[in-house]
Image (cartoon, helix red, strand yellow):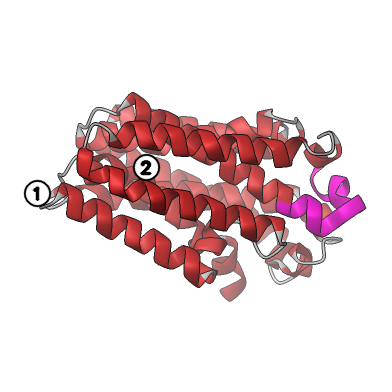
Amino acid sequence: MTAYLTMLRPTQWLKNLMLFFPPFLAGQMLLSGVFSRGVVPFCAFCLVSSAGYVFNDLLDRDRDAHHPRKCLRPIPSGAASLLGASILSAILLLSGLLLAGFISSRFFLMLAGYAAITASYSLLLKTIPVVDLFCISAGFLIRLQAGGELFHVPISPWLFLTVFLLAIFLGTGKRVSESHSLGTMAGEHRTSLAHYPPGFLDGTMYMTGGAVLLTYAMYTLNRHTLIYSVPLCLFGLLRYMFLVSSGKGGDPAESLLKDLMLFVVGLLWVMMVAWSIYP
């Protein structure tokens, strides 16, 4: 049972908190019924995203078997059977879409679109340079737009750009980390890494990191008290780049949970934004 629970990758559910960003930044989180309204949609996204992780593990089982760390995953290690993983993925997907159907037709279409993109990514798109990064970003943007639809909050253009660029930045950082840690074997474990020219991913990470800071700063100008959170944003970006460049991290969710400094910065950002929006 533990092996199958591990395949769900619960630490990655942090990404689905993006659903709550629109009401949180709009100052609505303390209104009656707002948080409870997001619980079921959050669960629906967790179910579908976990279905995608299991499906991806099924497809990558042979590659993961020769990976120094991924070989310990339930499927390549033999702790979970192919049939059991396949059934689990199908149940998760259908359960998540069923929940979404009870919420609204638009939310269902967004979640179905998210599922389609993640499946396409696992089947083919992750092997295509640059396209793989945009697929990752699309997943974050769908979460953001779904949150706006769910809570009836318009998405600011600057917030849209910030999330888009942040997702590219984090996805690139993860690939930089993989490229550095795996060396010449990187292309064997992630096909797209074999096609990126030397220095391209590093340059993309630095470029999008600077762009994230700029778009976030522009977003905060509409709310003058939020401008004081920009230094924290810069510190968080630099800390993540430091972890990636030094080989100490790469996966955004794991870095946030395991790196104390990054975790504290994230917590302080939430507290500062809350203090600014909820006086």
Q: Quadrant of residue 123?
A: top right
Residue located at (35% from left, 24% from top): 157
Return the residue at label 1: 31
Label 2 residue SS = helix
Residue furthest top in the image: 157
Q: Nearer the viewer, residue 150 or 52?
A: 150
Q: Tell me which label, 2 or 1, sits earlier in the chain.
A: 1
Q: Quadrant of residue 119?
A: top right
Residue located at (24% from left, 27% from top): 154
Q: Amino acid at mark 1?
A: Leu
Residue located at (36% from left, 28% from top): 158
Q: Quadrant of residue 267?
A: bottom left
Return the residue at label 2: 98
In this rendering, does residue 70 appear at all? yes
Q: Position of residue 269 (x, y in %)?
A: 34, 56
| Left-right relation of 60 to 170 | right
Q: Position of residue 194 (x, y in %)?
A: 86, 39
Label 1 residue SS = loop
Residue furthest bottom in the image: 2
The magenta segment is 177-190
**How many numbered callouts?**
2
Q: Position of residue 124 (x, y in %)?
A: 73, 32
180 in the magenta segment: yes
